Amino acid sequence: MQATGFQNASDARPYRAISDSDRTHVFTLSGVWELPIFRGRRFGGWQVNGTAIRQSGTPLGFGNALFIGNVGDIVLPKDQRSPDRWFNTDAGFNKISAQQLANNIQTFRFG
């Protein structure tokens, strides 16, 4: 968690949000195999080692988006989901900056 910014210019305290560097799921696997050849030689034994790391991505942030739709429309059916489109971004997010409110008080968290 981090509290490094204000959600709105009129807020008295920084808001608490999930850190940008948060990785909720991290799996690390490493191993060393000592080769059964070259033992007792001048340069010693040989080894092979490897490391594999798998981790989840960064937290999802909405930024300064104006949402005027139905929250229930955000979820896409499972057969329409893909890595490039996991939820419905056209469900009511107004992303045109010229149509944003002058004093848009945010209620969504950034991350």
Image: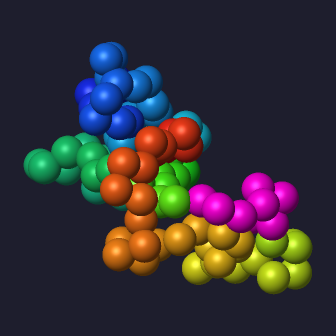
x%, y% of residue 43?
A: 13, 49
Residue 92 quadrant = bottom right
Residue 70 part of the magenta-drawn span = yes
In the picture shown, does residue 37 fall above or below 99? Answer: above
Q: Determine whether, in the image, residue 87 is placed left or right of residue 25.
A: right
View extreme (top): residue:
13
View extreme (left): residue:
42
Residue 16 quadrant = top left
Residue 77 quadrant = bottom right
Looking at the picture, tell me which residue is in the foreground, 94 or 55: 94
Q: Is residue 30 visible?
A: no
Looking at the picture, tell me which residue is in the foreground, 84 or 15: 15
View extreme (front): residue:
102
x%, y% of residue 21?
A: 35, 40
x%, y% of residue 66?
A: 52, 60
x%, y% of residue 51?
A: 42, 51
Q: Assign the N terminus to one quadrant of the image.
A: top left
In the image, which residues are magenta?
67-74
Q: Residue at x 62, y 73 (%)?
A: 89
Q: Is residue 89 visible?
A: yes
Which color scheme is applied? rainbow
Q: Residue at x 47, y 52 (%)?
A: 61
Looking at the picture, tell me which residue is in the foreground, 44 or 80: 80
Q: Residue at x 87, y 81 (%)?
A: 79
Q: Determine whether, in the image, residue 69 is placed left or right of residue 57.
A: right
Q: Residue at x 59, y 79 (%)?
A: 84
Residue 1 part of the magenta-drawn span = no
Looking at the picture, tell me which residue is in the foreground, 90 or 67: 67
